[in-house]
Image: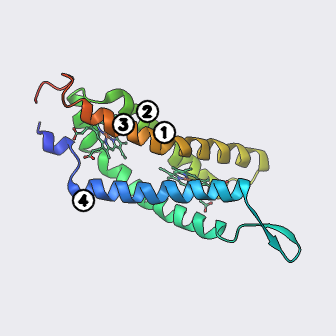
Amino acid sequence: MTTTAMRLGNIQRVYLYIVGGVLTLSGIIWVYLHHFVRVEGEFGLLHHPLEPLLLKVHGISAALMLIGFGSVLPGHIPRAWALNRNIATGSIFFTVMTVLSLSGYFLYYLSGESIRDFTSILHWVLGLGFPVLAGIHIWRGYVSRRTGQWPHE
Ligand code: HEM
Ligand code: HEM
């Protein structure tokens, strides 16, 4: 088993950072505008006009993120698992990505108000934690190179 196969390729890494960044930023800015900002309209206060565009950007980057997520399934995850490296943060990150992906797509289709509100809050609360978790996962991943979790280096 080679380490190169567990490590991300350059294109794969840049892809995940850029798509993950756009995904997270579009989600966070939407939460801010939707919950904290109103603009003066002809008939009273309205939602910010950028909200629909942000959701479109978010939806497209979400689809691209699923490709990125899929790209770590055959190499990165099983090989890191077999080498016993970064399993705790990796498993949490994997679970959060899965719940975000499912709840995101439920948001398209749910129409009942209370279940939609619940899914929305679950989704964006986990979403706010996403960049923090990603940072911890990456940091612990690099640390695990030299903490003896990995006998091959
Ligand atoms: C059980 C699941 C996982 C395990 C055991 C795991 C393990 C690891 C390990 C060991 C590293 C350090 C790699 C190195 O030394 O070069 C790492 C880094 C990283 N992992 Fe994971 N991982 C998991 C899930 C994920 C998922 C779901 C993603 C994203 C979709 C991901 C994205 C990354 C990224 C972006 C890095 C930084 C690597 C770099 O910048 O080259 N991982 N992971
Ligand atoms: C794997 C990661 C993610 C996927 C697959 C995903 C997917 C989606 C999808 C498909 C939607 C519905 C878009 C629409 O209605 O047009 C959505 C909505 C949303 N996402 Fe994400 N998302 C992810 C991560 C995030 C992150 C990191 C945040 C950061 C805060 C976030 C915040 C939001 C917000 C605020 C909404 C709108 C909620 C609503 O309509 O009530 N998402 N997401």
> CA separation, marks 3 and 2?
9 Å
Q: Are marks 4 and 3 in contact (CB under 8 Å)?
A: no
* Residue picked out by circle 1: 96
Q: Amino acid at mark 1?
A: Val
Residue at mark 2 to residue at mark 4: CA–CA distance: 24 Å
Q: Which residue is mark 4?
A: 11
Residue 137 has which mark?
Answer: 3
Q: Residue at x 48, y 43 (%)?
A: 130
- Are the residues flagged by discs 1 and 4 in contact, CB closer than 8 Å? no
Instruction: Assign the C terminus to one quadrant of the image.
Output: top left
Direction from residue 8 to residue 35 in the image, left or right: right
Q: In x, y percent, where is residue 21? A: 43, 56
> Which of the two residues, 25 or 1, is positioned nearer the viewer here?
25
Cα distance between the residues tagged 4 and 3: 19 Å
Camera-near label (3 vs 1) is 3
Q: Nearer the viewer, mark 1 or mark 4?
A: 4
Determine whether the residue tagged by mark 2 lies in a helix, strand or loop. helix
Q: Amino acid at mark 4?
A: Ile
Residue 111 higher or lower than 134, as above or below: below
